[in-house]
Image (cartoon, helix red, strand yellow):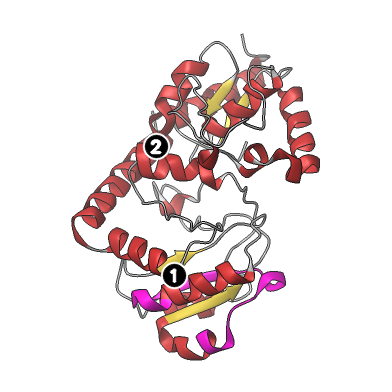
């Protein structure tokens, strides 16, 4: 599974009939074993507004229903990242963490030259992107991407554009060609302070609201931007969030926590780490028979 273990567990509990959606009230809270309390704004969009995502929700629920017959459900996560959820699922569902599944060059560096991640985000403009990034100081660039299933309105795109501009920070923005709604005035004013690249195929899932809950409240590696009364994150709010993350005491705490999780991720995939052991156990079972 490419989604987090927490999102996987939520779909699994829906399949068992332990949860039902949509929530009846905006203020209703979902309480599940191993997860922090979740409000409507924290849920994956397919659950918060299921009527608008019927086809996708049906497809994913069919997939999760079939998982009940499997001996192993491999998840791209690691135990320390979602430890309470992993504990709560023990003995109930064959969820096994084997991540993070990223090229070795970005974590343990055990495999020389291992930088490929299947469908590459940088293709076909990798040289342009890296040449530009090499001109910027470390830890200074804002990266913006909303995934292949994100649908951003023209109004929201404009607010993001001018929020990035106001932050006075270098930025790299991935925009799908089919949804390129960037204001011409903005593009003409960017110069060397930012770069916009077109989308290329990459598997991403729009469970970002739930990820945001963990990023801000559990892992403490980010801040959540607040929408206005019509559901738009205004440029001033984006500028505030960028400055909070990049500067000052809060920014320092976020960077320290990010480094902590990076080291824990590296430990998980290193020899003897939890994910490394789980993968070895899986291979042994494949060679010797079904999981006992």
Identify the image quadrant of residue 182.
bottom right
Q: Which residue is mark 1?
A: 235
Residue 222 picture location, percent across and down: 36, 51
Q: Is residue 193 left or right of residue 64?
A: left
Magenta segment range? 165-186
Identify the image quadrant of residue 3.
top right
At mark 2, the secondary structure is loop
Q: Residue at x 51, y 58 (%)?
A: 115
- Res 169 seen here: no
Q: Is residue 142 above or below residue 149?
A: below
Q: Residue at x 68, y 61 (%)?
A: 201
Report, in whole angstroms, how far the alpha carbon at label 1 lies from the one at label 2: 42 Å
In front of the other: 136 or 40:
40
Quadrant location of the N terminus? top right
- Asked whether residue 177 is drawn in magenta, I would say yes
In front of the other: 279 or 139:
139
- Asked whether residue 92 is drawn in magenta, I would say no
Around disc 2, counting alpha carbons within 10 Å, would you say few (fewer than 14), some (14 to 19), or many (20 or more)? some
Q: Which residue is mark 2?
A: 270
Q: Which residue appears farthest toward the top when viewing the image?
A: 292
Around disc 1, counting alpha carbons within 10 Å, would you say few (fewer than 14), some (14 to 19), or many (20 or more)? many
Residue 245 picture location, percent across and down: 31, 59
């Amino acid at each position: 599974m490419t989604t987090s273990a927490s999102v996987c567990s939520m779909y699994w509990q829906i399949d068992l009939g332990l949860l039902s959606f949509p929530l009846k009230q905006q203020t209703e809270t979902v309480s599940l074993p191993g997860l922090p309390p979740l409000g409507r704004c924290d849920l994956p969009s397919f659950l918060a507004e299921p009527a608008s995502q019927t086809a996708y929700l049906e497809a994913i629920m069919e997939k999760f229903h079939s998982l009940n017959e499997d001996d192993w459900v491999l998840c791209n996560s690691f135990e320390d990242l979602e430890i309470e959820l992993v504990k709560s699922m023990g003995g109930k569902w064959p969820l096994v963490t084997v991540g993070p599944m990223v090229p070795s060059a970005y974590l343990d560096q055990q495999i020389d030259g291992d930088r490929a991640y299947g469908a590459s985000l940088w293709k076909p403009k990798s040289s342009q992107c890296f040449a530009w990034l090499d001109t910027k100081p470390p830890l200074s660039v804002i990266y913006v991407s909303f995934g292949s299933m994100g649908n951003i309105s023209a109004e929201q795109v404009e607010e993001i554009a001018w929020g990035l501009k106001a932050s006075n920070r270098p930025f790299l923005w991935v925009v799908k060609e089919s949804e390129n709604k960037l204001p011409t005035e903005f593009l003409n004013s960017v110069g060397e302070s930012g770069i916009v690249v077109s989308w290329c195929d990459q598997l991403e899932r729009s469970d970002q609201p739930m990820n945001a809950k963990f990023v801000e409240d559990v892992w403490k590696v980010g801040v959540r931007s607040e929408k206005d009364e019509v559901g738009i994150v205004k440029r001033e709010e984006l500028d505030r969030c960028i400055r909070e993350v990049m500067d000052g005491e809060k920014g320092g705490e976020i960077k320290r926590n990010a480094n902590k999780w990076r080291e824990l991720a590296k430990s998980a995939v290193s020899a003897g780490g939890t994910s490394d052991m789980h993968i070895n156990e899986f291979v042994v079972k494949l060679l010797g028979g079904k999981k006992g």
